[in-house]
Amino acid sequence: MKGELQFNANWRACCTLEVCSISEVDEFVKRAHYLKKRPAIVLLCMIAKQNGQPIGCIVYSAPPREADKRYGGKTWELARVYLLDHIPCNAETWMIGQSVRHIKRQHKDVCHLLSYADPSVGHSGVIYRAANWRQDGMTDDDRKTPRCDYVDAKTGKKYGRKGNMPVDSAVVRVPRVSKYRYALDLKVKRRNEI
């Protein structure tokens, strides 16, 4: 069970997180991640390896268009995090921390990171809080009307836009569950960085 093992110094010693292409992480994202698809605009992909074997990935993408304005600087979205089930707990937080260090070193123009935790699939943001991200409300906090998905009643397939549905679909509008929003300011100096 994943929760029984800890991602300790012995595990960390044989694990790496490396920059890679989207094609190298597509298998993880499409086969194993609950969303089953990659983000539209990918900015950075990293693959986690244990003794040279792929065990997971992390993908950063372009955030919603209002993010740069909301956070006051260039913002990236941590859009996908995935690890194989047999990897011990705490590994996601390690992976996030390693990716943040890489972004701070290699992408100095990025000021903020943003991510979401989807309660409809049991996510609450524990990995973000453990990595010192701050909860920054919910996705629908500032909206006048809730966002909806469109479901084809015949097939059960979900679409983000009505215009993307086949012409013969039986359209059912389903309100989306509001997600927890988490943010990290990359320009704030932490005690251990001073």
Image: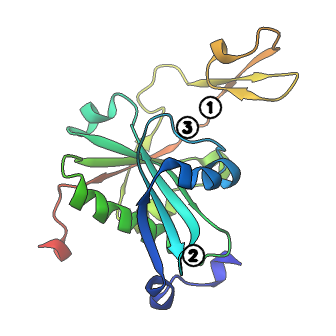
Q: Which amino acid type is marked by label 1?
A: Arg
Q: Is residue 25 left or right of residue 110?
A: right
Quarter occupied by the N terminus: bottom right
Q: Is residue 42 visible?
A: yes
Q: Based on the displayed image, in which of its 4 quarters is residue 142 positioned?
A: top left
Q: Which residue is mark 2?
A: 89
The numbered mark at residue 103 is none
Classed neighbour count for the residue bearing mark 2: other residues with Cα under 10 Å, few (<14), some (14–19), many (≥20): some
Residue name at image x 22 percent, y 47 percent: 111
Residue 171 placement (x, y as % from top left)? 77, 15
Q: Is residue 95 left or right of residue 170?
A: left
**What secondary structure is found at the residue carrying circle 2?**
loop
Q: Which residue is mark 3?
A: 178
The numbered mark at residue 176 is 1
> Disc 1, disc 3: CB below 8 Å?
yes
Mark 3 or 2: in front is 2
Quarter occupied by the C terminus: bottom left
**What secondary structure is found at the residue carrying circle 1?**
loop
In whole angstroms, how far apart are the C-alphas of marks 3 and 2?
26 Å
Residue name at image x 67 percent, y 69 percent: 85
**What secondary structure is found at the residue carrying circle 3?**
loop
Residue 90 placement (x, y as % from top left)? 51, 75
Q: Which amino acid type is marked by label 3?
A: Ser
Residue name at image x 22 percent, y 61 percent: 105
Q: Which amino acid type is marked by label 2?
A: Cys
Classed neighbour count for the residue bearing mark 1: other residues with Cα under 10 Å, few (<14), some (14–19), many (≥20): some
Q: Is residue 122 visible?
A: no
